[in-house]
Structures are given as structure tokens and as C-alpha cells.
Amino acid sequence: WVLESIPQEIIDTHELKVITLDYRRECQQDDIVDSLTTSEFSEETVSKLTGINGSATSSKQEHSESHFLHILRLSENGQEINRGRTQWRKKTSR
């Protein structure tokens, strides 16, 4: 779920450098979950993840690296199941 939510233009132009996963709690087979992803710009980003399921809206960044925050949570009560961060670096020209 983490990698599936990365914007296609990042997948096309970057490669995964670092992935960090923090498991918070278990979920069950019948649980309905929300998968949220956003570009990570500041520490305030976590509190702003109140949107609907889906991938992050990518803005054109001139940086050589891009960072994303990922949250998997229970739809019923919003409890976090997993939090992740990914760091992507620009692909090198060959």
C-alpha cells in the first residue's frame, strides 16, 4: 500500500532510497482501512492527514529528493495501524 500511492511522476523519475515502517497495532481481515499518503514538507504534516483515501498530490519539485508520509488507519475510528516514510532520490542519467 505504501508504494502504490506514490505519484507516477515520482516513480518515473526517482528511485526508492529509504523506507521506514512503524507498526502501531494489528488489524483484522474484516477491518476496513484508509491508506493516506502526502508529500512531507514539515512536522505538521501528520495532523493534516484528514483527507480521503488516495495518493498524494505531487507538486513539481526541483529537489533531488522527495519525501512522503504514509498512514494506514482503521476507517471505523481513525486509529493508526501503520505509519511509514519513504525517501526518493532522482534517478541518475545513464
Image (cartoon, rainbow, N blue to C red):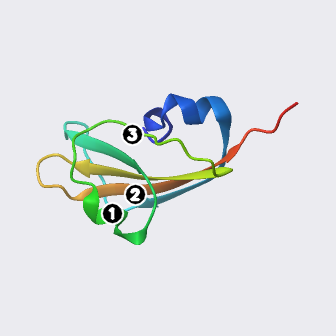
Corner quadrant of residue 93: top right
Residue 91 image point, x, y percent = 74, 38
Name the residue carrying label 1. Answer: 46
Residue 55 image point, x, y percent = 37, 37
Q: SS at mark 2?
A: strand
What numbered label is drawn on residue 83?
2
N-terminal of the two: label 3 or label 2? 3
Name the residue carrying label 3. Answer: 57
Q: Is residue 40 above or below residue 93?
A: below
Give how far apart the Cα atoms at labels 1 and 2 are.
10 Å
Describe residue 14's horizontal placement relative to residue 52 as left or right.
Answer: right
Q: Residue placed at 27% from the left, 65% from the top?
A: 47
Residue depth check, mark 3 versus mark 1: number of the one nearer the observer: 3
User: In the rendered view of the protein, which quadrant contains the C terminus?
Assistant: top right
Q: Is residue 48 above or below residue 94?
A: below
Image marks 1 and 2: residues in contact by CB distance under 8 Å: yes
The residue type indicated by label 2 comes to: Arg
Q: Residue placed at 32% from the left, 45% from the top?
A: 36
Give how far apart the Cα atoms at labels 3 and 1 are.
15 Å
Q: Is residue 50 above or below residue 35?
A: below
The residue type indicated by label 1 comes to: Val
Q: SS at mark 1?
A: helix
Q: Residues within 10 Å of mark 2 (few under 14, many from 20)?
A: many
Q: Residue placed at 39% from the left, 49% from the top?
A: 38
Corner quadrant of residue 53: top left
Residue sitting nearer the eye, 4 or 81? 4
The residue type indicated by label 3 comes to: Thr
In this view, which residue lies farthest toward the bottom? 43
Residue 45 image point, x, y percent = 35, 62
